[in-house]
Image: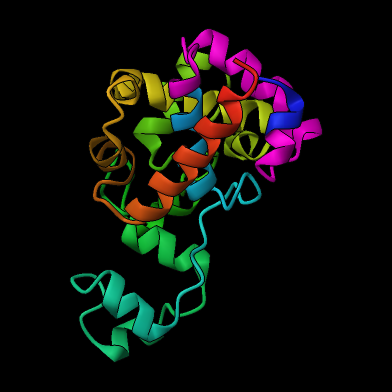
Amino acid sequence: MKPEQLTQLGIDAATWYTPLIDMFARYNINTTQRQASFIGQCQHESNNFRTLEENLHYSADGLMRTWPSRFPSADVAQQYANNPEKIANKVYAGRMGNGDEESGDGWAYHGRGLIQLTGRDNYSACGASLGFALLTNPELLLQPKSACLSAGWFWGKRGLNSLADSNNIEEMTKRINGGVLGLEDRISKIKAAKQILDTYD
């Protein structure tokens, strides 16, 4: 992969080229198919490598639509609307290794990185693997190097290279997203990345 290929994809090569190349080597993302799959998925997840933090700005209606079991009424939802920290502490409480709502774990370990790492357990395991103190410094995932490495760690942990090899974008998306949200956009971005990466092969 060349810096100009990232530029063609609308990605800031000065920021992202070196972190991506280093991470690709570490996690054996070493074919154009694997690299295109990684880049396309991350483009979707991170607004084309521009957004490294989960957007938790929800209205009361949005909260009730997104988490109906946690916000069963407008009265409950209004107490949390447009307060990202409070929302994170509620919706991520008691999950993924997080403590209860009052612990603050939901906000401390909300989604960060290129493929948004979420939850105390994931921050702990990823940090241990990478040698980063993510439990005490979760904001490290907002830096390009660690944002890339955390996504590579997740990629490897979920076995996504083999799915990239078979171009199974639907299953890949399920392992990243838990469902198939944005599948058509992901397919389109992976295809575009592959076409550009192949031009220098």
> In the drawing, does residue 74 fall left or right of residue 146?
left
Q: Position of residue 124 (x, y in %)?
A: 42, 26
> In the drawing, does residue 58 fall left or right of residue 90?
right
Relative to 9, say whether 159 is above or below: above
Q: Is residue 32 magenta?
A: yes
> In the drawing, does residue 85 fall left or right of residue 16?
left
Q: Residue at left 27%, top 23%?
A: 166
Task: Pick out the residue farthest to the front.
Answer: 199
Q: Position of residue 33 (x, y in %)?
A: 44, 23
Q: Main secondary structure of the magenta part?
A: helix
When asked about the image quadrant of residue 171, the answer is top left
Q: Residue at left 47%, top 12%?
A: 27
Can the viewer see residue 135 in this picture?
no
Relative to 139, say whether 161 is above or below: above
Relative to 23, say whether 188 is above or below: below
Region in magenta: 6-34
Task: Pick out the residue farthest to the bottom.
Answer: 75
> In the drawing, does residue 3 fall left or right of residue 118?
right
Of the pair 55 and 132, the residue shown nearer to us: 55
When asked about the image quadrant of residue 96, the answer is top left
Of the pair 75 and 25, the residue shown nearer to us: 25
Q: Position of residue 10 (x, y in %)?
A: 69, 46
